[in-house]
Amino acid sequence: MRALPRLALAVLTAAATVAVVSATADAAAEPTPITVLTSDFEDGTTQGWSGRSAETIAHSTAVAHGGTGSLLTSGRTATWQGPSLDVLGTFEKGTAYTVSAWVRMSSGSDNARLSVERRTGGVASYDQVVGNTAVTSGSWVNLTGRYTVATDVEFLRVYVETASTTGDLYIDDVTASYVPALPIQTDIPAVKDVITEFPVGAAITGAETVTQHGQLLTRHFDSVTPGNALKWDATEPTENTFTYAQADPLMAFAKTNGLAVRGHTLVWHNQTPSWVFLGADGQAMTATADDKALLLARLENHIRNVAAHYGTDIGVWDVVNEVIDESQSDGLRRSNWYNVAGLDYIRTAFRVAREVAPHAKLYINDYNTNVPAKRDFLFGLVQQLKAEGVPIDGVGHQVHININWPTVAETKAMIDKFVPLGIDQQVTEMDVSIYTSSSESFPTPPADRLLKQAYVYRDMFALFRQYPGEITSVTLWGLADDNTWLDTYPVARKDAPLLFDTTLQAKSAYWGVADPSKIGASASASVSPSVSVSPSSSTNPGTGSCAVTYRVTGSWPGGFQGDVKVANTGTTALTSWKLAWQFTGGQQITQLWGGTHTQSGAAVTVGNASWNASIAAGGSTSFGFLGSWTGTNPVPAAFTLNGTACSVL
Ligand code: XIL
């Protein structure tokens, strides 16, 4: 199976935000959201909305998304002008809000964006909550995204703007909501304590450094990689104007908490502003001597500033990112960098980085390095450049993989290939998608995929741990499934590629790393995993047609979270199901996802949700819940499925 195709990533994503597929994508897997803001414009007023400048804001009944009223913005003279609302007293630092707005043009068409302006110490920053989305005058379009305020602010406004025109805009039915955070589990081993062969890291945005996210991060990880904050578009958006507003708070958090930092990345073909590649004449650069000299001068200036700004606080730099393209006969990516400067951009980048940051390990980083053709081109390039004296210290393997690809053997071959070069290797951006093609999409991660993912994490970490001399760190591309780039790449859908779920609780994937004995045995990740665990006859008190695994995945004073797996171990498929048990400790279910529940005293019954009603023979499904308890929280001793006793695993 081949890797998913990669799309251009020239999108500026704010450090503190993450786009999300839709508000409903997580609904089945998360507790009920709490709404903190509703602007429906049904009362004839502007409900506190105002312009960002001199534009006119007025209530309107010309069109409405729901009911009869909406909000009209007219007289716009710049694309950034639009309706805005003060949310300073509404949004709390560290909480991830889902913001939704309906937008429509009065005439014509454009792209609309949902944005936030925040100010700290009088300095303004602009975050994108939802990127450019096509809007017209013909219908209402929904913009939904997630936003977390990660720093202290004195000004916070959410607003709608457009990409290129200044026509009149309608908005309606704006809402903001959040899902109450669950406490992190403190009774499970820290990943960094279990994995002692090398430091383990996570890529972060501002959202990962606050409240429960910050606790989870520092509890389990040794190091961090700012996921976007050190890229060129964030650090030098216009020529020779360096801004560290995104990265500085992350670096300060790392320092305070003793986390090492991987610097990512000094040179890339994505997330690099277009001015970098414009010649002195304002035209796109070509391979002339003048353009090449100007481009390399800009590169040198960029690295001198950014690498010097952080000095010894950054111990490893991804100096160049994704320079290999195995579809080229010479294996070199035809980026703007290469087209103008040839290999000299790589030589210059390493030379300057070594000069400015002599303490730092300098890396060449790429994806799909397990693909033999790509791996071999990368090997050849590193060998050639090292022979020339280019100071390359290590090869970074991104390891964006999925539950079916690649095999452990292919990954082993990837590591083995570079050992003779005598350089360090790091796994820099690991995640394991639950999808195996771009056409799949699940509202909630299926239990069998999550189990298979756990086997992949188990087997890959077991492999990495066999190379303590070569692999000097392993970084995951994110902290928890609530904030992953795979929610929008390569297509918009909810993915779940990390060790912790959207409520920050440990997944089977976590146990695959921390204690594989907890996920049961499976020969290898490349073997199709069986989620129906056969009951052993000696411990089976039931009929053998169902097996239940009940797990408390988190517990805190008065509350707990549970996860229940129901396996159909019979020979006939179920078309609907009801699982019943007794809570003998007085526990009470407060919220449940992946099913519907009733509780009467101690008796609990959970019926299927519409999407998981059928369980094939040999298949399984899962649901989760939040509960309250007092005194003790005993695990139920017996379960019945559709009235028949099950074995308890
Ligand atoms: C991703 C970020 O995580 C996203 O937020 C951003 O929108 C696009 O870039 N390979 C890399 C990383 O080297 O920089 C990319 O990060 C993921 C793929």
Image (spheres, helix red, strand yellow):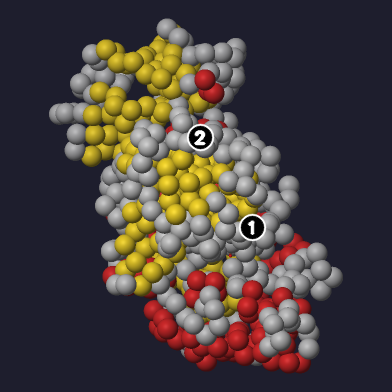
> Residue at image x 69%, y 51%?
4
Q: Is 173 in front, or is 572?
A: 173
Give coordinates of residue 81: x percent, y percent.
48, 60
Judge from the rendering whether residue 287 lies leftward or rightward of residue 298; answer left or right.
right
Q: Secondary structure at mark 2?
A: loop
Task: Say the numbered circle drawn on residue 320.
Answer: none
Labels 2 and 1 touching (C-beta < 8 A): no
- Relative placement, left or right, of 510 versus 531 is left
Residue 68 in view of the camera: yes
Q: Quadrant of the C terminus?
A: top left
The kind of residue tagged 2 is His
* Mark 2 burial class by Cα count in 10 Å: few <14, some 14-19, many 20+: some
Q: What kind of element bears circle 1?
A: helix
The extreme left residue here reads: 631
Residue 189 visible? The answer is no
Task: Tell me, for residue 65, which label it has, or none.
Answer: 2
Task: Tell me: residue 392, above or below residue 575.
Answer: below
* Residue type for callout 1: Thr
Q: Is residue 240 above or below residue 543?
A: below
Residue in view at x 43 percent, y 51 percent? 57
* 340 relative position to 623: left or right: right
Foreground disc of the pair 2, 1? 2
- Mark 1 highlights which residue? 411
Residue, x 33% and y 28% (percent of image)?
Answer: 591
Category of crowding for the residue at label 1, using alpha-carbon neighbours closer than 10 angstroms: few (below 14), some (14–19), many (at least 20):
many
- Residue sitting at x 80%, y 64%: 327
